[in-house]
Image (tube, rainbow, N blue to C red):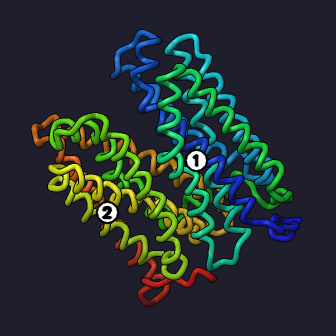
Amino acid sequence: MTVKDAPQPWPSLVIFALAMGGFAIGVTEFATMSLLPYFAKDLAVDAPTAGHAISAYALGVVVGAPIIAVLAARMARRTLLIILMGVFALGNALAGLAPSYAWLVVFRFLSGLPHGAYFGIAAMLASSLVPANKRTRAIGQIFLGLTAATVIGVPAANWLGQEIGWRWSFGAVALLGVTALLLVAVLTPYDEPDTAASPLRELGALKRPQVWLTLAIGAIGFGGLFAVYTYLASTLADVTHVSSLYLPLVLCAFGLGLTAGNLVVPLFADRALMPTAGALLVWTAAMLALYAFAAQNIWAVSVDVFLIGCGGALATVLQTRLMDISGEAQALPAALNHSAFNTANAIGPWLGGMAIGAGFGWTATGWVGFALALGGLAIWLLSVAIDSRIEGEPKLVEDAAE
């Protein structure tokens, strides 16, 4: 019996369970940045060194996504999701108990391993529960868990870290992971493993140029969002000249933008997938270019950060795109989508930091992001051109039901 054949009286509850896992992952990914001063002081390391714990998580995502997707190709999706969330919960629990900074880095790496594979497999499962013309909406609803974490979970985890201690924040994330595990176990329908699947079949997806181009769109085009987000606190202090009390509000605006994007954009993507991806890249480029001017005023920058956040729906759109172009090898490309976005999380801040270090100022991150979004748009144009050549006619509007 496949997932589609199994009884599915409440697919919305299954998607809610999957989104809860996304919420837990979102909290640990973003809250660790705000907890950095606390665990750095407690573990007797300076801030730059403590930042390696954040990099360790991202490295875990990049490494874990392809390895797990390939090795677990024949595993039932429900079973794999339960195992992944179990490893995630364990890694965060151990991080909260870390006796030294070195062990914290190890446990953060362990926590990141399930990230990409979880979202990739969850997206495949969610899309199998709904009609073909609602796939992107279903995937977007899973990502709502991640975006809700930036609005609700991260501030709560930061408060917990300040009032009780940073270790309790990781403990709370572990509890969220266990909750998600139980919800997936109870609400997700049973499915039989795909006996035709194999590691070699999954690796075969990497022979498809369109898979690499789609991953490159995310890795390059999404980098600007992270360039701005990483240096937002410094920009508000040194350019906008406002109190640090405004930072949580602006970060909340970013999270609300991510949420709004994942609610609205999939409605268009399910009708015209690639045009929506191109439009998002143009939108993101424009909003990042405005950032340099909006940063002078707290209200203007808050609105602009919200609009930049809306462009974050690109991750959802590209997730569906990878499912369309990967043939039978679905798991590996779906998981690699999150490796691509963590690559963007490395490229954007790195280039933004170079621009700042060269003396162009904090708002230069907006122009760096603008250039990266245009780079992603150039790769998108190449992908569309290849589609056009294969089909013999421009493929600017895709039928999601195909």
> Which residue of the protein is positioned furthest toward the left in this rendering?
359
Residue 201 percent coordinates (x, y): 68, 58
Looking at the image, residue 241 lies above or below residue 163: below
Q: Secondary structure at mark 1?
A: helix
Residue 16 percent coordinates (x, y): 69, 57
How many numbered discs sit on the rendered protein? 2
Q: Is residue 81 left or right of residue 209?
A: right
Q: Identify the residue shown where x is 23% and y is 41%.
A: 236
Q: CA distance from mark 2 to mark 1?
A: 23 Å
Residue 164 percent coordinates (x, y): 54, 20
Q: Is residue 20 visible?
A: yes
Whether pointer 2 and pointer 1 mark residues with C-beta atoms closer than 8 Å, the reply is no
Q: Residues within 10 Å of mark 2 (few under 14, many from 20)?
A: many
Q: Which residue is mark 2?
A: 284
Please name the amino acid that badge 2 sits on.
Thr
Q: Secondary structure at mark 2?
A: helix
Q: Identify the residue shown where x is 58% and y is 80%.
A: 400
Q: Which residue is mark 1?
A: 116
